Image: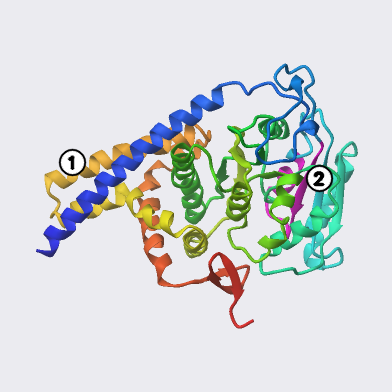
Amino acid sequence: MLATIVVSVTTILTFAGLFYYVAVLWSARSFIRRRSSPLKPASDLNALPSGPSSRNPDPSASSGQAVGYAGVSILKPVKGLDPGMYDAFASHCRQEYAGDYEILFGVSSLSDSSEAPVLEAIRRLIAEFPERAIRLIETPERLGPNGKMGNVVQLAQHARHDYLIVNDSDIRVGSRYLAHIMEEFRNSQGRKQVGLVTAPYRGQAHGTLGSKLEALGISTDFFPGVLVALKMDGEIRFGLGSTLAVSKSALEAIGGFAPLVDALADDYELGRRVAKAGYGVVLSREVVETSVPAYTLSGYLAHQLRWARGIRDSRRAGYLGLVFTYGLPWALLNWVASGFAIEGLALLSLALLARVTVALGVGIGILNDWQVMRDLWLIPVRDLTGLAVWVWSFAGNTVTWRGETFRLEKGVLKRVGG
């Protein structure tokens, strides 16, 4: 009796997962078509209106004759030096961008010996790229549980330009990164003025099983979900930590970065607030790369749990709906519950084929992540651990972050015992 119920339920969930995989491929096709179409010519970014719902009144906006390039301040909060981080820093200095831009590095202490390696790397960067406006700024104040955003709040006070880009310290970018990100601000989204641009990303794994599973999940599970959200809503209403490019007018409309110093999912929350203020949030065509730490399996699961609880706390209804996205694990459980029946095997084979198609179509077709091909055999493991973490995330409200334990209350971090 129990086995029959399990087979029935997992059959329904498997077909829901198959429908989701089709939705991913449909969404991916739309994104690829959008990415291959040229952006509209537009006027100088410095002439953009400050209001969230107005169009550029400049008549040259449609002629493309007065194209200009706004100044940009790149804010890089850093803590410690990880492998490959210097190359990531240097990639921001090799930009083919006609406008002015500066890079501001924020470090909590310029005298702390533990920060010596990253300080040395930044000073080396300044020496190697004397033509770039690079500043090293001490950000000593602990403004909230989210140290990264506390750092960003202090960095923003030193920014000279009207457009700010925040991205994680390990993000590596292409030479046209700034040009492509800033182009998105020139194109109004419907009647909305673009206030924030974010970017797709892939993860560069570093050897361990945990690192490979994390990178695989980014390209074949997380980003497919972003594509579906974009297709279903016609826009996105959140940001990704890989790139948070925001206009000062939009930032001022939401009260700056300060309200995010106690948020776990600060990237999601920044995008949500900008969208709520009436501005457009755009997913760029530019793909960047993050460095995935060499996680142990337990470290990988702990990171996934923190991430999952952050998403669950930020958007509960959408998070519950993730149960319908795990078609492959449900098909596997269905096959086992059916006593390894041929019908169960057929359903599992169909789910596996659809899942692999999604992984290749998005991971390689959009993100150009060829690690997906190498680690394709890990897809069932990644999806089973993903489902397990999803279930586990409902078992509590605490997360461990940088050695400290916090309780989550509606997206806000509350220090346990503090």
**Residue, far left:** 1
Q: Is residue 126 shown above or below 384?
A: above
Q: In the displayed structure, does residue 336 sit left or right of residue 152?
A: left
Quarter holding the N terminus is bottom left
According to the picture, the residue beneath numbered tag 2 turns out to be 103
Amino acid beneath label 2: Ile
**SS for tag 2?**
strand
Q: Is residue 375 visible?
A: yes
According to the picture, the residue beneath numbered tag 1 turns out to be 346
Q: Position of residue 405 (x, y in %)?
A: 58, 74
Q: In the displayed structure, does residue 359 sit left or right of residue 292?
A: left
Residue density around tag 1, few if under 14, some if 14–19, many if 20 or more, within 10 Å: few
Indicate yes or no whether the magenta region holds residue 157. Answer: no
Q: Nearer the viewer, residue 134 or 160?
A: 160
Amino acid beneath label 1: Ala
Q: Nearer the viewer, residue 188 or 88?
A: 188
Indicate yes or no whether the magenta region holds residue 85. Answer: yes
Q: In the displayed structure, does residue 291 sit left or right of residue 67?
A: left
Q: Position of residue 63 (x, y in %)?
A: 72, 16
**Residue, far bottom:** 417
Who's the residue at 43% across and 34% down the image? Answer: 27
Span of residues in magenta: 71-90
Residue 400: quarter of image: bottom right
